[in-house]
Image (cartoon, rainbow, N blue to C red):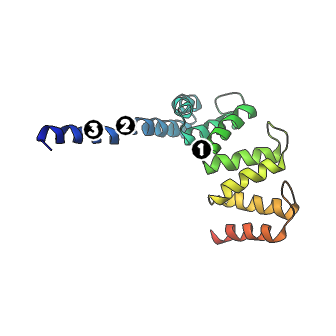
Amino acid sequence: MTGVAMKILFHAMLLCLLLPLPASADFNEGSEAYKRGDYGAALQEWRPLAEGGNARAQKNMGVIYRQGRGVPQDFAEAMRWYRRAAERGNAKAQFSLAHMYYEAQGVRQNYAEAAKWYRRAAEQGIALAQFSLGLMYYQGQGVPQDYEEAYRWWAKRGARR
């Protein structure tokens, strides 16, 4: 390769490495604003990221709407954001979505849906999801009652401590 081609290649690679930084900076700025209690600023930073497909920002949008931080509390909107993040594999959003189905927050209580999302979060190591899924198996809520399966999930939770 010629010197010019090497320079072009180097600059192209550098540009590719730097492109994700603004989104990360915006996410972090949103996190700092949230910690300060400036929920409007957090929402302003996270919304464009969430709309662009950032699962962490989507999960945080769910938190904001579920808790009514800087916006009127809106369980339906929280569910919408949690679902988007959960479908992208965000374990915390999967847990929150499951819990909303379990507790009937903004949605009709649906133990089968709760178990489905608890399982996805539990498989990613969320200890409270492992406990909750075990409890659902123990009680036969949304899944067939199965004490062995319940203890298996509880043991996974215990192994993480």
Residue 51, position as x, y percentages in the image = 56, 30
**114 or 159: nearer the viewer:** 114
Q: Kindly identify which residue carries mark 1.
A: 88
Name the disc covering residue 12, or none: 3
Question: Residue lying furthest left in this view?
Answer: 3
In the rendered view, does 92 fall on the left or right side of 133? left
Q: In this view, does 90 lie to the left or right of 74?
A: left
Residue 157 versus residue 39 in the image, above or below: below
Element type where label 1 sits in the image: loop
Residue 109 in which image quadrant: top right
Tell me the residue that label 2 is attached to.
19
Name the residue located 44 percent from the left edge and 36 percent from the top edge.
23
Dot placed on the residue nearer the N-terminal end, 1 or 3 = 3
- Between the C-alphas of marks 1 and 3, the distance is 29 Å
Among the two numbered marks 2 and 1 on one chain, the one whose residue lies closer to the N terminus: 2
Residue type highlighted by circle 2: Leu
Crowding at dot 2, Cα within 10 Å, few <14 / some 14-19 / many 20+, comes out as few
Q: Find numbered disc 2 in the image and state the secondary structure of the residue it sits on.
A: loop
Question: Residue at (82%, 50%) from the top-left corner?
Answer: 112
Q: Closer to us: mark 3 or mark 2?
A: 3
Q: Residues within 10 Å of mark 1 (few under 14, many from 20)?
A: some
